[in-house]
Image: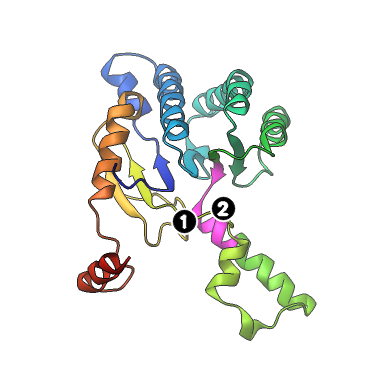
Amino acid sequence: MIELPRHVAIVMDGNGRWARRRHLPRAAGHRAGVGATRKIVEVCVERGLCALTLFAFSSENWRRPRTEVSLLMELFVSTLQREVGTLHKNNVRVRFIGGRDTIAANLLHHLEHSEQLTADNSGLQLNIALNYGGHWDIAQAARRLAEKVESGALRAADVSPQLLADEISLAGLPAPDLFIRTGGEQRISNFLLWQLAYSELYFTDKLWPDFDRSDLETAFAWFAGRQRRYGRTGEQVEQKENNV
């Protein structure tokens, strides 16, 4: 059996292009993307992964046409209404990361309900990045540490990478072992900038609505063939593995 990642992070790219190639409205691509997401979550549950983090809507996506943003928000609500019961039955814990100050009240209600309903589940942790950006994530963590310094609870000299990591989104979870981006682009796009420091980066031309179980298993097999050195030499890693 191949070695699986504990935590997978995915940029689900290509919904719009999938629709355009079929002469369909972009909305059709986003709806097809929901179906792909459901299948990938199912695989991660079956394979016993610790966490799956999905980039659903970035802080930059507000720049898209107003009609598309409105449709996406409505799609988030309808998807949560339809899917959260099944996720709960499958012991999945749902969590949303990102700023909530600009989220409409109706959607915010469903986000919080989903989190509360699944809070005690011990299976896959499904993290959904909504109104999220890596710069925002690091800045809000730094601000929390600054507040502790300002209050006297922490000395500036004691600020460390670990203390910052404790304030970052997804604190307490293992960092993503595997980052996947569909759609052919080869960039991180302000996603989990802190957390992806040592992740293996996997890019595929498959558009998100077409990304299925076999594609995910291919990514897992690719990951299993990687040698993760964390600054050490290949010889050191091999020696450690041989001594286990």
Residue 31 percent across, percent down from the top left? 45, 19
**How far is disc 1 from disc 2 in space, using C-alphas?**
8 Å
Colour scheme of the rendered structure: rainbow
- On the image, numbered disc 2 is attached to which residue? 170
* Residue at 28% in and 28% down: 214
**Numbered disc 1: secondary structure:** loop
Q: Amino acid at mark 1?
A: Ala
Residue 126 percent across, percent down from the top left? 54, 38
Q: Describe residue 234's horizontal placement relative to residue 14 as left or right.
A: left
Q: Can residue 40 be seen by looking at this rendering?
A: yes
Question: Which labelled disc corresponds to residue 25?
Answer: none
The answer to whether residue 134 is magenta is: yes
* Residue at 73% in and 70% down: 147
In the orientation shown, which residue stands out farthest toward the right? 151
Residue 106 percent across, percent down from the top left? 71, 27
**Numbered disc 2: secondary structure:** loop
The correct choice, above or below, for 152 with respect to 175 in the image is: below
The correct choice, above or below, for 116 with respect to 87 in the image is: below
Residue 100 percent across, percent down from the top left? 67, 43
* Residue at 39% in and 21% down: 29
Q: Nearer the viewer, residue 102 or 220?
A: 220
The answer to whether residue 5 is magenta is: no
Local packing at callout 1 (Cα closer than 10 Å; few below 14, some 14-19, many 20+) is many
- On the image, numbered disc 1 is attached to which residue? 175
Q: Amino acid at mark 2?
A: Leu
Would you say the residues marked 1 and 2 are in contact, meaning their CB atoms lie under 8 Å apart? yes
* Residue at 72% in and 77% down: 149
Q: Nearer the viewer, residue 218 or 106?
A: 218
Q: Which residues are magenta?
A: 129-139
